Image (cartoon, rainbow, N blue to C red):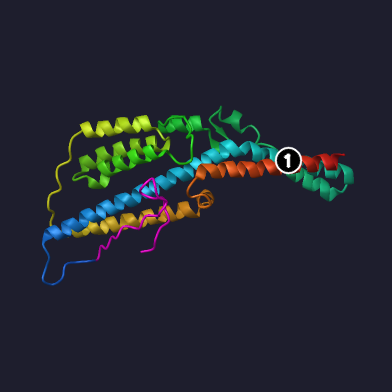
């Protein structure tokens, strides 16, 4: 299978994880193999898939956090650039009187004007870009607190990996246990997305105090083969998610600074400030 460039499974390295070797089609030779050998292969495939899921989820959180912080920190600078472009176009049109310059000025001003009456229409729940964070949080029972960094701290990432490896739903032996793990991992993912180290520690203690899953029992060969095939399909779905993340605009930007994505925001801000200064100087020149 192809190598997928998702975040690492360890905090000290930016090496991308290898895709889990899920060979659902491999079967024992004609002489037969002990069932335990097949069960061991299933357990190895499960662990490989979990590590891959961790890599995809950590990258998804980085993409989401980068997108949110990019909007929060740099949005005002982009708005200022749009305003300066409109002012420059209007000054040029006023000086030249050219209808084409007037048209360009109107277009530039239209890009600055917000969508009218959207906030009032939805009573503070939505603006032109969608739901406000507070509204989305209330609808999804998540904290309103935004992330402080693109990449959660090393300790937060360590806690997250430990929790996922212990409580992953794929390790469940029955439907009831899978439901319990699904609900727990949903809470773990939400805490990780916010970089909440305290809550992750609380969840780790909660899991340790919970019921201990029964040790995996040997399964019939047919069930083990079906399990391998399911793991292979699951891995293929994750590969699509990983590719979509990597090919997104934000994912592509993160590739520019794989070791320090938070620094990338500062660098972009510096570039935008320089562009603002250039536009202000140009506005002063055309308005003189």
Residue 223 visible to an observer of this rendering: no
Q: Is residue 218 above or below residue 190?
A: below
Residue 208 appears anywhere in the view: yes
- The segment highlighted magenta reads 1-25
Q: Is residue 206 magenta?
A: no
At 32% across and 43% down in the image, what residue appears? 161
Question: Who's the residue at 33% across and 38% down the image?
Answer: 159
249 in relation to 206, above or below: below
Instruction: Indicate whether 195 appears above or below 168.
Output: above
Q: Residue at label 1?
A: 277
* Quadrant, the N terminus: bottom left
Q: Is residue 193 left or right of residue 78?
A: left
196 relative position to 127: left or right? left
**11 part of magenta stretch:** yes
Secondary element at tag 1: helix
The answer to whether 208 appears left or right of 83 in the picture is left
Q: Residue 194: x and y, percent?
A: 43, 35
> Which of the 4 quarters of the picture holds residue 123?
top right
* Quadrant in the picture for the C terminus: top right
**Residue drawn at point x = 30 percent, y = 49 percent:** 50
Relative depth, front residue between 273 and 209 = 273
Q: Position of residue 110 (x, y in %)?
A: 72, 41
């Amino acid at each position: 299978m192809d190598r997928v460039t998702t975040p690492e499974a360890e905090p000290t390295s930016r090496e991308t994880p290898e895709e889990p070797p899920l060979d659902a089609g491999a079967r024992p030779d004609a002489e037969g193999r002990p069932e335990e050998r097949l069960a061991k292969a299933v357990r190895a495939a499960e662990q490989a898939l979990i590590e891959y899921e961790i890599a995809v989820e950590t990258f998804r959180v980085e993409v989401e956090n980068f997108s949110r912080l990019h909007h929060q920190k740099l949005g005002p600078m982009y708005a200022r650039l749009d305003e300066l472009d409109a002012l420059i176009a209007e000054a040029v049109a006023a000086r030249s009187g050219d209808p084409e310059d007037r048209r360009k000025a109107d277009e530039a001003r239209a890009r600055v004007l917000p969508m009218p009456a959207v906030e009032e229409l939805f009573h503070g729940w939505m603006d032109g870009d969608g739901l406000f964070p507070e509204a989305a949080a209330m609808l999804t029972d998540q904290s309103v607190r935004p992330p402080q960094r693109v990449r959660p701290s090393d300790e937060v990432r360590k806690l997250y990996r430990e929790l996922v490896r212990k409580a992953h739903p794929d390790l469940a032996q029955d439907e009831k246990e899978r439901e319990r793990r699904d609900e727990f991992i949903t809470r773990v993912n939400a805490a990780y997305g916010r970089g909440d180290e305290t809550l992750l520690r609380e969840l780790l203690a909660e899991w340790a105090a919970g019921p201990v899953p029964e040790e995996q029992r040997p399964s019939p060969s047919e069930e083990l083969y079906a399990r391998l095939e399911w793991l292979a399909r699951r891995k293929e779905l994750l590969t699509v998610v990983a590719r979509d993340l990597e090919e997104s605009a934000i994912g592509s930007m993160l590739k520019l600074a794989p070791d320090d994505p938070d620094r990338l925001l500062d660098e972009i801000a510096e570039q935008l400030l320089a562009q603002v200064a250039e536009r202000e100087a140009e506005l002063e020149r055309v308005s003189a």
